Image (cartoon, helix red, strand yellow):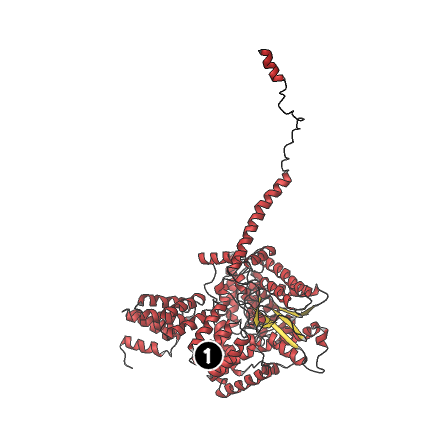
Amino acid sequence: MSRQRKKSRSGTNPGAARPGPKAKPQPPAPAPTGGRLWMFRLVAAIGIPVLLLAVVEVGLRLVGYGYRPSAIVEVKIDGRTYACDNSRFSWRFFPRHLAREASPYIFPKIKPSNTCRIFVLGASAAMGVPEPAFSFGRMLHVMLADRYPGVQFEVVNTAMAAINSHCVLPIARDCVRYEPDVFVVYLGNNEVTGPYGAGSVFAPLAGNLSVIRAAIAVKGTRLGQSMTDLLAAVGARDGTPEMWRGLEMFVDKHVRADDTGLQAVYAHFAGNLGDIVWTGRTAGAQVVLCTVAGNLKDNPPFGSQHRRDLSAADAERWDKTYQEGVAHEEAGRDSEAIDAYLAATEIDGTYADLQFRLGRCYWRMGEYEKALERYVNAREADTLRFRADSRINEIVRDTAAGHRDGVHLVDTARIFEQNSPHLTPGDELFYEHVHMNFAGNYLLARSILEAAEQALPDRVRKTRAEDMEPLTEAQCAQRLAYTDVDRYKIADKVLHDFLKRPPFSNRLYYAEHIERIERDVAALRAGATPQAIAQAAEQYRWAVEDNPNDWLLRWRYGQFLAEHVRDHRAAAEQFGWVRDHLPHSWLAHQSLATVLGALGNADEAVRLYERALQLQPTSGRTHFFLGEQWHDRGKTDKAKKHYLQAVRWEPDCVPAYNSLARILAQEGKLDKATDICRRGLVFSPESAVLHCTLGTLLARQGQRTEAVEAFQTALRHDPDSAPARDSLRILLGRPN
């Protein structure tokens, strides 16, 4: 039995297949090496999130979210493609309610033959603030057109207020897509206060330029825009102004000359300016770089601070010495004042006001070289840095010197010195600190003309008219329709929108300066007679006939006709032409809508306002105008909606608050109407209209004492206010 079991174990079953050769065991799969494993993990950690972000980005674009971030966008007119300004470009750099935009422009995408295309790059001074119609770029245009009558010049001014080199570099990169012949760069005033500057309220300074550029690039994506919108919805960043207030927004943003952030600003400016030049040159464009001029003699410092290590005892001693100098100066004893001020500089010479006072005393004594030195010191020590300092201009000069070919320097700062009394630029060339008046813009345009002519392509230079002198300042004024009415309007705007507001109102010698400017404005107002208006109308007609394709000239003519001649039909003809030739411009649609509304064409006015808001939804004034249209039709719900949007985007839009309060009062919501008035007065405390409306509302609620106070405040701000005067008389029970 046991033998059988053994046999069956060891024997062969005749019916079974023979086993094949024994298979060799396979080695296990090799484990990933350390390097390959980390590579896999890296791809998984970075590649997958990047892919997901790309999918989200594409999805946001497909559903139409966000805005085009480029400075130049394209539109089609009658089947032809044109390039034009993008009013939303600066949303990458500013909160939307503070965003700035360029003066509208448009040009064919494909450059026509026999055309020379020049791009102007810069900020508000290059834009032509306070009136872009009289910028140096427009003067350069008429000068070139006059000297080269066979050439079509396009001078495209891409500049806008409050921007700096961080913003201008992306603009330059957009410009090179459109066959530029010349770049003209006038830039440097906003490097400290603009986005990513050491004294900015818009975007904080970063020490690394690459970090700043990465942040700008991210904000150009739809995903980055969604993140920005989400943060805006949660709440504004601490320190972000609620509304645009110009330089007033920066009154506490002091930056000393020894601030470490200032060195980063200089480095960033040098890097950006060099890349702007490289961008233009690689596209085949010649580049004209300009140093930046500023008002030295008639612009006291905006901010002064003592050196950081000044002891309390030295500060007391400095102040005593300084006040002695002030007393001497105010008494007309300039020599004694200088002695005291010089003694103060031995204690602390970094205080900007001290340097300016020295300069003024030296100037009155006829020691102009010493005065100039002190005026320059005052600018360098100014802790509210709204003017380009010496280092900024040195960077411009160094950048130009670093390029042998194709880069031309216009040393504006020195040219303005050479054309100023005793080499010291002042109000002869400037409206205030950096914005040039007509004479200043002409001087700069004339200076750029010489460099631009060297930069023009050979095909253009060959066509120059022989023995043709550049246009004179008076001839430029004629071509651009710079009338006596414009002189008055600009001077009045500078007075009220600039000089009477902080930080201008915080400067030394403010009272005497404003008194002089008010006298000048009064004289210009007196000159705006019916005869002057008739002469201005004739000058506009001539200029438009001479250059019928100048949209800005036509737009200003339309404004003039509507405001001074009261000919809304003729104004509509001009604005209609502008709208047809600038279909991308919300301003063109708004202007046409306003005069059509005055002519009684309410339906077309509404349509145009709505189109303007499609193009620029953040225009508070357009929302107000559209609200008015609905209000007049009795559509108060629609009117309220647009009035609320008006004060959202333009918090000092007094008429919107007033109209909104009227609607709420008619609905019996007196408390809400009162709140609206008080809200408006936060932003416009000097509005007699709002104080008067508030008084009426308070009186209706039985708050007699508060109502009387409101009407009295209204009369302080506007002594000629008949509604406030009559309401106050009734409340006080006085006879007529």
203 sits left or right of 286 in the view: left
Tell me the residue at 64%/60% (across/down).
271
Give the x, y percent position of residue 407.
Answer: 69, 67
Give the x, y percent position of residue 37.
Answer: 61, 40
Residue that badge 1 annotates? 595
Q: Write down the quadrant of residue 601 in the picture.
A: bottom left
Q: Write down the quadrant of residue 134 in the picture.
A: bottom right
Considering the image in quadrants, where does the N terminus appear? top right
Extreme front residue here? 15
Count neighbours of disc 1 (C-alpha within 10 A) and say few if under 14, some if 14 to 19, many if 20 or more: many
* Residue 314 shows up from this direction: no
Give the x, y percent position of residue 476.
Answer: 61, 81
- Nearest the viewer among 370 and 272 is 272
111 sits left or right of 193 in the view: right
Task: Kindly state the secondary structure of the residue where label 1 is placed.
Answer: helix
Vertical placement of 253 versus 604: above or below?
above
Give the x, y percent position of residue 254.
Answer: 53, 61
Tell me the residue at 34%/70% (across/down).
663
- Nearest the viewer among 71 and 407 is 71
How many numbered tags mark residues here?
Answer: 1
- Nearest the viewer among 314 and 417 is 417
* Residue 715 shows up from this direction: yes
- Nearest the viewer among 180 and 444 is 180
Considering the image in quadrants, where does the C terminus appear? bottom left
Q: Amino acid at mark 1?
A: Val
Q: Write down the quadrant of residue 727 in the picture.
A: bottom left
Tell me the residue at 56%/53% (across/down).
54
